[in-house]
Amino acid sequence: MRRPGDLLLVLLWTFTSRARSLNIPFEVEQPPTITNHTAGPIIALPFDNTLTIRCEARGNPPPAYTWTKDGQELNLPNIPTVKTDNRNGTFMFHNKHFAQFRGKYRCFASNKLGTAMTEEIEIVLSTSPKFPKETFDTIVVKEGYPITLHCNPPEGVAPRQIYWMTHGLQHIKQDERVSMGTDGNLYFAYALPQDSRKDYGCVAAFQRIRTIVQKTPLSVKVERLEPENNSSESVSATLPVRAPSLLLPSGVQTEKLLLKGQDLHLECIPAGYPTPKITWMKMGETLTDRTKLDNFKKLLTISAVDEKDQGKYMCMAENSAGKADHYFDVIVEEPPSWRTKPPQNQLSVIGSDVFIKCSVDGKPTPVITWRKNGKILQDDRENNRRVLDETVMLHKAGPEDSGVYQCEASNPHGSVLANINVLVMNMAPLMLTKDFQEYAVIEGEDIVMNCSVFSSPPSSVSWTKEGTVVEGERFHVLENGQFLKIIRSEKGDMGIYACMASNREGMSNLTALLDVKDPTKIVAPPQDVQISSGKLARLMCRSEYDRSLQGTFEVIWRKDGEEIFRSSENSFRYNMEGDQLQIRDLNISDQGMYTCIARTSLDEDTATAFLTVLDTPDAPMSLKISDQESRNVTLSWIPGSDHNSSVREFVVEYEESHWEPGRWKELQKVTGNQATAELFLHGDLNYQFRVYAVNAIGPGPPSEPTERLKTPPAAPDRNPENIRIHGHFPHEMDISWDPLLPIEFNGPGLEYKISYRKLEVEDKWQEHLVTRPSFIVRNTSTFAPYEIKIQSRNSLGWGPEPRPITGYSGEDIPTAAPHNVAVEVINTTVLRVSWSPVLPATVRGHFGGYNVNWERMKSFLSPDKILEEHKSKSFPGNRTHVIVPGFEPFSEYRLTVNVFNKKGKGPKSDPVNFYTPEGVPEKVPVLFPRIQDDDTVLLEWGPPSVTNGILTGYFLKYHLLNKTSLEVIDSFELNLTLPDVTQHQIVRSDRGNLFRFYLSACTRAGCGPAELAENHSPPEKVGTEASTSTQRWLIGTLCAVALLTLLAVIVCFVMKTKGGKYAVKEKEDLFPDAESQAMNDDAYEYSKPHTHDVYQDQPESQCTHHLMG
């Protein structure tokens, strides 16, 4: 019992004690401190080979270790199976010594300044749990009475699990009537005949020691109330009502003691018929929200109880026959625990008062035992040492009071132990921080410089910079000067700092060096970007930093917070090139937040960007088919991820196992904003479906296929299309069509019904059934119109009613020729041909058009030569006239017309003879101007190779040009009326000028295109060769003139006698119909010559006079 004077003394010393609580630096001599030890209890398991008990401490000087076992000093045997650690107090022993080492241990660590010790470490030896060997009589009970089967499981290493099982390892079924209690017993509220069996076995399983043990099976026999009735259900229905009673617990009240933090388990198992219902309550209070009811409300559990859960609880069992109840007194206690924290080490000045307080809580109140260096500490007033329950006081402490003080608080539920190092000493300042320590800080950041000092009594510490006391609002001296903190450092803060510490025992100082660095900045951060899968991604991160930190500078990339080059399995796809992070073969797993960290040893800067990977969509999921009994079904699905590119469409594919197994075909497309498709299916097929999505990147993979869907057979849904009618022979009609696809058969036995009848007469439908997609109708009229229709059918019925089409039977060649054929000559090469059309009936086929055939019989330039040149031209369509080009001028022709169809050409019309008029000549082949002397130019040429008529002469036009500017000075025209002339001499008036000549050949139809020549050569002599050449040209020209004169006489005679057979019209009715409009006027236009009229009918004397000039 603490006296009042003692209490006053405690209060006085509490306010006057100058002892300090601190961690003593290891450089100072100090008593041991336990740093690591094994916490008990330790259970030695049978399969453990060894057991290790640890004890580690630090001290200066290093401590030595001893052990006690059950309060007695332990001397470890020097045998190979027991090993100790020379560095600490840890020891290990083999499992053969487990039984020998069972007990309670303490470890002591000692040096010259004191002894520290551990809590008790208990080693518990586990034994193999066993059920005793027992023999049990059969338990006989009457139907309707309760049964209790006792398990009495053996103790063992927790956790322990208990089961009731049969000989065949089947669990005994549990319900409201039959249940197992937490004690392991099996309880029956009332017995039924089916409870009779001989193999009720209780099994206990110990997981930590991997052991299962089984009790000798129990035998139960339930005697029926009415043995003559074999129905257990009817017997149960006649059981007498029994009032409730409690099989567990016994008595009327139970006391339940728990430790704070443990789980509370209260159990009530009733007997009675009908099975009683259990209710729970807490007297005077409501049950906590942490209450849980299990095992059909027979077990109440409250987790982690505390003082509030103390009190009286009641369970009540109730049925129609009455009630039974039981009370529980729940008491919550707790083992010792520190009220705030364990007592701390202390450093005191010699002659000061030391106060050590050990504040603990617990229920019951813990008993505190004080020790010094492991030995019991007694109250000693004479030596100014008082031990008062939870307080130790040392008055005017001296060095002899230094040591390790132990406070151990215990109650029946456990104990706690604290080692308190107390140093009573005087000491000059000891600098614990390194002298000339270098510090670096980023401009604008905070820096703390250390000046750690150990001394007794405490030192006074001050800071200076280059001889000046450090002061200002940015400078803070912390913890009695042991730290100098500079806020928002500046370049001017760089320099040399000094720290000085002093007390009454002495003085010490140190120097610190501070450097202020430029900050690290990211000047070109990465940007958010979207890139397609498979491409190369580039993320920029350009930074600036203090060059003095170049050795520590690095750029680190993280994806979603995880460093790329260290953690990623695909780091080989990442590459740092300059200021860029490159990611090859981009895939969807690369999408995420990328963080660039530019870092030095002092600071870092970060920037983030989100990389979005665009990829093809994932496959749709969870395909579902509705309305499976019909052929109109709805297919639905759950879209997969679109990988950041909206789905444009879904494509539904199908595969059927009958016609083309394994081949997937497109069935339908739906827009990307819907996830269903209405499908019309063909009959009698075994379908399965799959769906894939398409976005801007491309099509994604297909979904998993659906289950097979068998559609019911049905009649065909459509008839054949693209019906084609051909007549290869005059009295036949070939009918063919595109057949139905196999998947469109809708059932077995597909065939086609061909129906046809002749049009324009009353004819009956002729019908034929075929399986091939073609049919030939024979013995038809030539090119007669027919109505044809084709209908599909199978064994289930007909397809829809078809629409008839019109076709024709086979063609034959036409039988009639056009008549009244007339020819109108438009110009020298173009005709207009007209005729009266043939009757449609004579065409005997599809009308093709008309052929115009002509034969060139002779040319009037060579009237004695028979030519017989044959040509023809086809003109499709039904017409009565055409424009025909391609004739030669000045020739005699014979022309016919016939009609044609697909089968061939009809007979030709009566021939018509006609003549084409003269045309203009082609260009002269050569034109040479020669300067003969200073005054004349000789112009020479050759006659045209094609004259298209009788040559009448030449037309010469020439310009006089300025020799320098080539401008036209004057122009001249001249008609040369002799056709055999091939040269002409021109007098030059000015020798310095040049000539440009144009020469055209002429007939009576006009003059042809001109040939161009200019004279640029100097004067040439005309000698004997020139004279000879002139003579040859003159002879040739005279012969040609004689021949042309003869031809002109013949032509005039023919024109006079046969001119009425045809007419020459100039540009009259050139385009009488639409078919001829492709020929414009320019194609057949010819020019009038300067000196000649257009060729017309005129008297022979005039024609002769004209030709002769």
Image: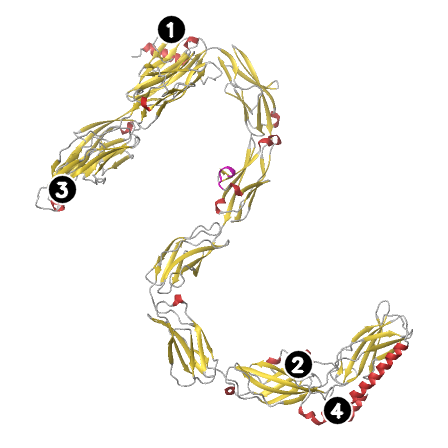
Q: Position of residue 37 (x, y in %)?
A: 38, 21
Q: Earlier in the sequence, mark 4 or mark 3?
A: 3
Q: Amino acid at mark 3?
A: Pro
Q: Which residue is mark 4?
A: 1050
- Residue plotted at (35% across, 12% down): 375
> Can you say which quadrant of the picture contains the N terminus?
top left
- Residue plotted at (31% across, 25% down): 43
Q: Which residue is mark 3?
A: 193
Q: Is 788 positioned to the left or the right of 129 in the image?
A: right
**In terms of secondary structure, where does tag 2 sit?**
loop
**In terms of secondary structure, where does tag 3 sit?**
helix
Q: Earlier in the sequence, mark 2 or mark 3?
A: 3
Q: Earlier in the sequence, mark 1 or mark 4?
A: 1
What crowding class fits label 4: few (fewer than 14 Cα within 10 Å), some (14-19), or many (20 or more)?
A: few
Compute the Cα span from label 2 to label 1: 152 Å
Residue occupying the far top of the picture:
382
Front: mark 3 or 1: 3
Residue 342: quarter of image: top left
Q: Amino acid at mark 4?
A: Ile
Q: Which residue is mark 1?
A: 383
Compute the Cα span from label 1 to label 4: 176 Å
Number of the label disc, if any, that sits on residue 1085: none
User: Relative to 113, is 614 above or below?
Assistant: below
- 1023 part of magenta stretch: no
Number of the label disc, if any, that sits on residue 886: 2
Q: Earlier in the sequence, mark 3 or mark 1?
A: 3
Residue 758: quarter of image: bottom left
Q: Position of residue 638 (x, y in %)?
A: 40, 52
Magenta-colored span: 564-569
